[in-house]
């Protein structure tokens, strides 16, 4: 995709949704971090259902430690891999208390040292909580970037690298959410809804649905 096409691509996504938001529900930086960790290989809808009651009373690492691993499991047992996720949440909560004064750090280097937090999770937290122009390449962004020709790459890391190079500065803050939402609701994996796509004419996908 050419530079002018990329500008037009994001201009249209911006026009359709000027202030895109994460579909995960959270109340502060800590609950955002926990929600993102829980969302690995799970849907945002499923995570929101599991954390609705949890976050009403548990919204700090100290409170999570008081709840304990078994108590956390009782809240998130409907989420895939809940046993390992509960263990990671308790462990990362302890590190936040011991090493960060109970606060979520605002650097990727510190975040990825937390149990259950990889580069993608760290990038989501940095973008949503701290307004940093990061690019968390999930399956939706990976698919959209390759299918449209926006930023093709064989690995999420390569796609992330390309996206950060080609996306104009004025769109970098919200680009992550625009691409996720576009992939989730329009440029879907099995049957993309090309007829309702606002960037159809800019897309390089040869097998557009009619």
Image: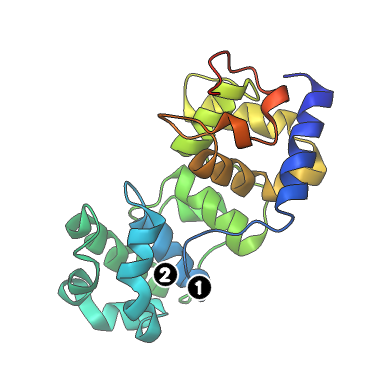
In the orientation shown, which residue stands out farthest toward the bottom? Answer: 57
Instruction: Identify the residue position indicated by label 1 in the image.
Output: 103
Against 74, residue 80 (above or below) is above
Q: Earlier in the sequence, mark 2 or mark 1?
A: 2
User: Looking at the picture, how far across and down is residue 129, in whole percent?
Assistant: 59, 63
User: Looking at the picture, how far across and down is residue 96, in whole percent?
Assistant: 42, 69
User: Looking at the picture, how far across and down is residue 8, in whole percent?
Assistant: 80, 33
| Side of 100 where 68 appears, left or right | left
Q: Disc 1 on helix, strand or loop?
A: loop
How packed mark 1 is, by other alpha carbons closer than 10 Å (few <14, some 14-19, many 20 or more), is some
Please tell me which residue is depicted at 45% across the width and 76% down the height of the picture. 102
Please tell me which residue is depicted at 54% across the width and 44% down the height of the picture. 180
Instruction: Identify the residue position indicated by label 2 in the image.
Output: 96
User: Looking at the picture, how far across and down is residue 16, in whole percent?
Assistant: 72, 49
What's the mark number on residue 173? none
Against 172, residue 1 (above or below) is above
Task: Tell me the quarter of the picture where residue 36 sits.
Answer: bottom left
Q: Quadrant of the N terminus?
A: top right
Q: Disc 2 on helix, strand or loop?
A: helix
Please tell me which residue is depicted at 39% across the width and 65% down the height of the picture. 34
């Amino acid at each position: 995709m050419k530079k002018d096409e990329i500008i037009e691509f994001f201009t249209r996504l911006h026009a359709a949704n000027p202030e895109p938001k994460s579909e995960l529900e959270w109340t502060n930086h800590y609950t955002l971090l926990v929600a993102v960790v829980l969302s690995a290989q799970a849907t945002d809808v499923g995570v929101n259902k599991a954390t609705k009651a949890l976050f009403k009373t548990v919204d700090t690492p100290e409170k999570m430690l008081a709840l304990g691993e078994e108590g956390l499991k009782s809240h998130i047992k409907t989420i895939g891999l809940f046993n390992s996720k509960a263990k990671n949440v308790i462990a990362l909560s302890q590190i936040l208390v011991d090493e960060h004064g109970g606060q979520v750090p605002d650097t990727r280097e510190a975040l990825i040292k937390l149990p259950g937090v990889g580069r993608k999770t760290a990038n989501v937290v940095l973008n949503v909580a701290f307004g940093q122009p990061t690019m968390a390449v999930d399956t939706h962004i990976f698919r959209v970037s390759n299918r449209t020709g926006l930023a093709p790459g064989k690995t999420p890391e390569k796609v992330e690298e390309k996206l950060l190079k080609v996306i104009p500065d004025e769109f970098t803050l919200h680009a992550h959410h625009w691409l996720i939402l576009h992939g989730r609701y329009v440029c879907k994996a099995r049957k993309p809804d090309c007829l309702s796509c606002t960037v159809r004419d800019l897309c390089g996908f040869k097998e557009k649905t009619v």
